[in-house]
Image: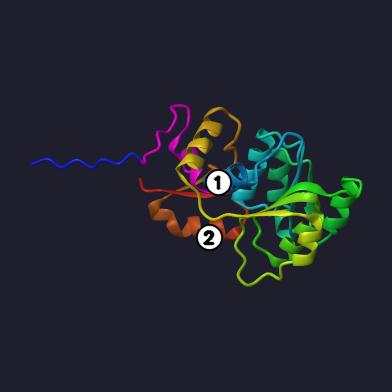
């Protein structure tokens, strides 16, 4: 007797993508589901991305490909050596170290006091989230992806007066993964730097140490 498993929820990897590149679809799908599927990117949008982790750097390329005119990323001292450099290489027009400079003041200056169209939080840091609302222009959009460890005091009155739209998002879906595979296959999203740190399963300890160091954009463990 022969048993067959029938499941349509499989993704075909384009021939011009490696398995290592395709592995980026999982984190990238989180960004695509929230940003492309919910908040949307309009041609000419000025976008701020809070955070410089792997998803944030993939999201940076995504919003650029979707038509954003300017993209700014914010981070911390730990991001100065590698993450900010990577962000600029991927198209960031400005990187802001929130531990050294006031990101709200810099964004207001860059927009002539108006604020930006879209803020995407991928930091999960309450202080960054609150500063993000202060960067929005009237009728601006806030896309919440980062997951805080505690509660965040939501600036309700400020959001009402600014007529902001807030999009909350968690995980991804089948369509988002397909979008990501297509964007990577078309060269709209670059995997440069994300697949440099591949380890065998036997070297799992070294892989985790590399991930904890914060110096690698992404760490991949291969079963063989």
- Dot 2 alpha-carbon crowd within 10 angstroms: few under 14, some 14 to 19, many 20 or more: few
Q: Residue at x 74, y 59 (%)?
A: 76
| Residue corresponding to mark 1 | 33
In which image quadrant can residue 67 be found?
top right
Of the two numbered discs 2 and 1 on the same chain, state the one appearing first in sequence: 1
Say if mark 2 contacts mark 1, CB within 8 Å.
Answer: no
- Where disc 1 sits, the SS reads helix
Residue 31 seen from this side: yes
Q: Could you say which is closer to the camera, residue 130 or residue 202? A: 130
Residue 24 % position (x, y): 51, 43
- Left or right: 61 in relation to 173: right
| Residue corresponding to mark 2 | 209
Residue 28 % position (x, y): 55, 45
The C terminus - image quarter = top left
- Where disc 2 sits, the SS reads helix
In the rendered view, tell whether residue 137 sits above or below residue 193. below
């Amino acid at each position: 007797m022969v048993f067959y498993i029938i499941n349509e929820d499989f993704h075909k990897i384009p021939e011009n993508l490696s398995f290592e590149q395709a592995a980026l679809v999982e984190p990238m799908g989180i960004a695509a589901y929230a940003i492309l599927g919910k908040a949307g990117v309009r041609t000419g949008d000025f976008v701020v991305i809070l955070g410089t982790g792997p998803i944030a750097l993939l999201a940076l390329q995504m919003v650029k490909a979707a038509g954003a005119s300017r993209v700014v990323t914010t981070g911390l001292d730990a991001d100065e050596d590698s993450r900010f450099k990577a962000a600029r290489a991927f198209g960031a027009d400005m990187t802001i170290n929130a531990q050294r400079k006031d990101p709200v003041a810099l964004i207001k200056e860059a927009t002539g006091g108006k604020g930006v169209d879209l803020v995407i939080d991928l930091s999960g840091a309450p202080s960054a989230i609150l500063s993000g609302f202060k960067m929005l222009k009237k009728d601006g959009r806030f896309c919440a992806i980062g997951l805080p460890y505690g509660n965040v005091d939501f600036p309700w009155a400020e959001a009402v007066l600014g007529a902001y739209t807030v999009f909350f998002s968690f995980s991804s879906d089948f369509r988002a993964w397909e979008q990501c595979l297509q964007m990577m296959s078309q060269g709209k999203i670059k995997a440069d730097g994300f697949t440099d740190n591949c380890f065998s399963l036997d070297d799992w300890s070294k892989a985790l140490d590399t991930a904890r160091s914060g110096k690698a954009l992404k760490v991949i463990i291969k079963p063989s």
